[in-house]
Amino acid sequence: MKVAIYARCSTLNGQDPTTQTRELQEYCARRGWTVVGEYVDVGISGTKEKRPELDRLMADAHRRRCDAVAVWRFDRMARSVSHLLRVLETFRALGIEFVSLSEQIDTSTPVGKMVFTILGSVAEMERQMIVERVRAGLRNAVAKGKKLGRPRVYVDCRRIRSQRSAGVSWRAIAKEMGVGVPTLYRAVERYEIPAGTVAASPLD
């Protein structure tokens, strides 16, 4: 099996990525796997999803240059379940296995597949909890009398017609009224009024 090794350390103070890569190399040797590449991000926080070497690893994974990706520990790859799951889902779609040495997880095994399923469930629960918190916040805001959504914009259609008759451009009128040109178009189309009638038309 062709394996790509990924390692990361946040700073150089007291941390040496070679500790991770050495143990991963030894593990792959014991399994009889061939290490086809090492990808090491140094001085980069795990909270950052965009990292030079991780990006290079993902690009090579899409080119199917490896059969598996091995890391020393989950948090070397990602600091959140959602990010880790996105990476693992990408690997699964590409037919690439994932190994985490410290947690002894290997998605090529039945136990590893079970862990992947559990992670997916946790991530889904996390998403549902966020949605419910947002909904609860909106309900609370409505209960307190707060108006939700974009503020309503009032456009004087008579004024638009008058300025257009005087040859003023749509752009100039929109700038003067502080709205976009499409808003003026919608005002004329949706709230057409007879000349000489005074009206202010509410727009969403």
Image: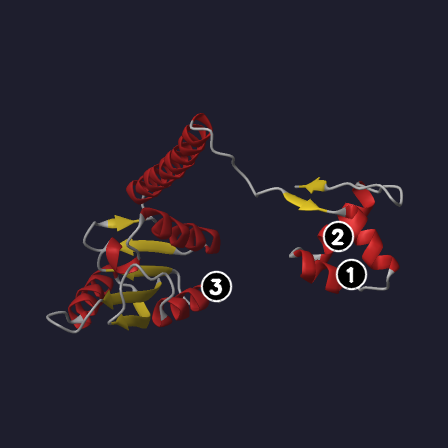
Secondary structure found at label 2: helix
Mark 2: amino acid: Leu
Label 3: which residue?
62
Circles 1 and 2, Cβ within 8 Å, touching? The answer is yes
Residue 180: quarter of image: bottom right
Residue that appears at 44% across and 68% down: 60
Image location of residue 33, percent across then percent down: 29, 64
Circle 3 packing at 10 Å, graded few (<14), some (14-19), many (20+), is some
Q: Is residue 128 above or below residue 71?
A: above
Q: In whole angstroms, how far apart are the C-alphas of marks 2 and 3?
A: 47 Å
Q: In this view, does 13 lie above or below 114?
A: below
Residue that appears at 48% across and 52% down: 93
Mark 1: amino acid: Trp
Residue that appears at 68% across and 62% down: 175
Label 2: which residue?
184
Circle 2 packing at 10 Å, graded few (<14), some (14-19), many (20+), is many
